[in-house]
Image: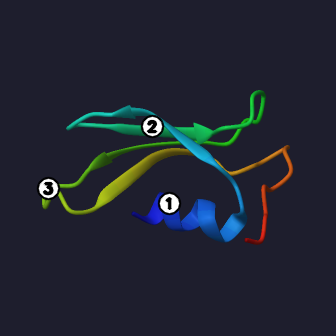
Amino acid sequence: DVILDYSIQGGFRLKRIKNERRRITSRCLVKGCPWRVHGFPTYDRKTYMLKTLKDEHNCLSATTNK
């Protein structure tokens, strides 16, 4: 999942708002942060086409070393 990889690399926690057969929407877990992505599956049902991407975080990344 590319969105999961993005959140790990950037140190941000994301929440899936919609995970339906025809669409997916995720947002930043931090309340008030404008980051959001919305997309839908392509015909092969293996990849997604992004329709909307608000690629700006106004929150701090949650980097922790364990």
Residue at the disc numbered 3: 43
Residue at 65% x, 71% y is 9
Viewer-side label of 3, 2? 2
The amino acid type of the residue labelled 2 equals: Thr
The amino acid type of the residue labelled 3 equals: Tyr
Residue at 45% x, 37% y is 25
Q: Residues within 10 Å of mark 2 (few under 14, many from 20)?
A: some
C-alpha span from label 1 to label 2: 13 Å
Residue at the disc numbered 2: 25
The amino acid type of the residue labelled 1 equals: Leu
State the image quarter where residue 34 is shown.
top right
Residue at 76% x, 36% y is 33
Q: Residues within 10 Å of mark 3 (few under 14, many from 20)?
A: few
Return the residue nearer the eye: 5 or 64. 64
Q: Helix, strand or loop at disc 2?
A: strand
Q: Residues within 10 Å of mark 1 (few under 14, many from 20)?
A: few
Label whose residue precedes the other's in the sequence (1 or 2): 1
Label whose residue precedes the other's in the sequence (3 or 1): 1
Relative to residue 21, is residue 33 drawn left or right?
Answer: right
Numbered label attached to residue 4: 1
Residue 21 at what x, y percent from top left? 20, 38
Relative to residue 61, is residue 22 drawn left or right?
Answer: left
Instruction: Give the quarter of the figure containing the N terminus.
Output: bottom left
Q: Helix, strand or loop at disc 1?
A: helix
